[in-house]
Image (cartoon, rainbow, N blue to C red):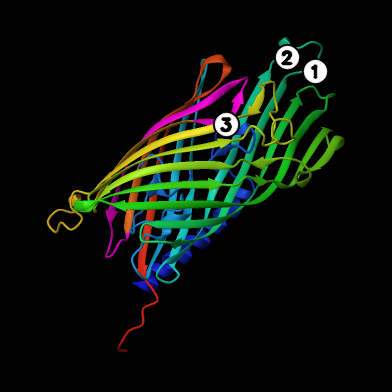
Amino acid sequence: MSKKISAIVFTAMMLFSCLAAKAQEGSYSSFSPYSVFGIGNLSDAGTAYNSMMGGVGIASRDHRYVNFLNPAAITERDSLSVLADFGMFSDNRIYRQGDLRSAKNLINIKDIVVSFPLGNRFAMSAGLVPFSSTGYSFSGRLEDDAMVGDIGNVNYKTAGQGGLYQLFFGIAAKVTDGLSVGVQGLYYFGNMEKTSTMSFSGSGYRSINSGYKVNMNAISPKFGAQYEHKFPGGMKMIAGATYRLSARMKGESEYYKIASISNISDTLAANTLKLGEGDVKIAEEFGVGISLRKGDKWMAEIDYTFSDWSGCGMNATQGFSSLGEVKFSTTTSQKIRAGFELVPNRNDIRSNLRRWSYRAGIYHGTDYFKLDGKKVKDTGVTFGVTVPVFRWYNGLSFGVSLGHRGTAAGGMTRENYANFSVGFNLHDIWFQKPRYE
């Protein structure tokens, strides 16, 4: 069993590395008109286990699952247990702006995480997860009779792709039987490309291609703490807190503008901005949460996160500010989440359905930017189930998130979405020394 699970984890890691590399070369990892701005859409952190409960995890402690949302949570484990999680998700969205309608469906990797013990009171974790994504495409055409002169029809297209990934390594310790603390080292890396093209059907006019190519990386730590208080009757309460420091971007943003006709092209403008010389950064984030757990029967949790992006320097920096007439500005972002888990009977030998873990959650929050002075809101509900597989704590998780983002009023876009996630949580016992060969 150990060899089989190790092989699965290794295969998943190789697959994720290949797909992550492909995403960095320009494939869509998500698709949204709002990803035009800043560093794109921020990804929902956590595994499928977290997503099924509205994204909670700051105050979650469960020895059956990897929870990296709070660096301190990995100390909750059985002795010698090695845990791994590999997840994928399907992003399905319908967009509406006035009378216009469109839709997009994508499949991408959600996470790959592993955690193992370092002695009786210490544990370590490592993983690779998406942090943000840029993906959009707009096109249009102006007919000849709407133009002045004989320039012909005008076709234009604006597109963007790319995003940021987050590689992390964490270590946590049990200070006392009730208090755990942890820290993660976060490394962000990735790129974005945003392009605009204008072409004329008239043979005597040149097409114009312009855009930005942005390569980015940053480093920051994230701290976490959890305190567990036990009550009589198997009830316990857990309070948790996290704090992620801001991270200054390094890399470069290249701008270009090229005019071409037939096989002849001419560079009209080009410049490269060194990001390390500016103040572009990923904002700090503070989160708190509290949960109640009744043995292995049920758990309820509520979390709150707050992040101030207003001073992150993206408002007027090339490659991050908007490409059109919409006024883009960064602002504070906050989100409240609540989740619930129920297991009818973990050890039932007659009904498999009573051994399953059933979860549900809700969330509401605002994005890190404003458009024409208006905040973009995101609200949704989640559902999911984990089915035990084989022995120990191996399981297969299925989840769905239904929600909406933005508004169709005032020239903005409303996104209605149904996101599906699949997670493989793997468990094994390592570091055993048999008494007899």
Helix, strand or loop at disc 1? loop
Q: Residues within 10 Å of mark 3 (few under 14, many from 20)?
A: some
Q: Of all residues shown, which one is farthest toward the left?
A: 350
* Label 1, label 3: how far apart the Cα atoms are: 46 Å
Q: Position of residue 69 (x, y in %)?
A: 46, 49
Mark before the other along the chain sequence, 2 or 3: 2
Q: Position of residue 21 (x, y in %)?
A: 60, 54
Quickly name the residue at label 1.
Answer: 151
Q: Residue at x 42, y 53 (%)?
A: 67
Quickly name the residue at label 2.
Answer: 144
The quarter of the displayed image where residue 150 is located: top right
Say which of marks 1 and 3 sits in front: 3
- Magenta stretch bounds: 366-394
Asked if the residue at tag 2 contacts the one at tag 1, i.e. Cβ–Cβ closer than 8 Å, the answer is yes
Say which of marks 2 and 3 sits in front: 3
Q: Is residue 261 visible?
A: no
Helix, strand or loop at disc 3? strand
Q: Of all residues shown, which one is farthest toward the bottom?
A: 437
Q: Residues within 10 Å of mark 2 (few under 14, many from 20)?
A: some
Quickly name the residue at label 3.
Answer: 332
Residue 203 vs 169, above or below: the answer is above
Front position in the image: 186 or 177: 177
Residue 364 vs 48, above or below: the answer is above
Q: Is residue 138 visible?
A: yes
Mark before the other along the chain sequence, 1 or 3: 1
The quarter of the displayed image where residue 205 is located: top right
Q: Amino acid at mark 2?
A: Asp
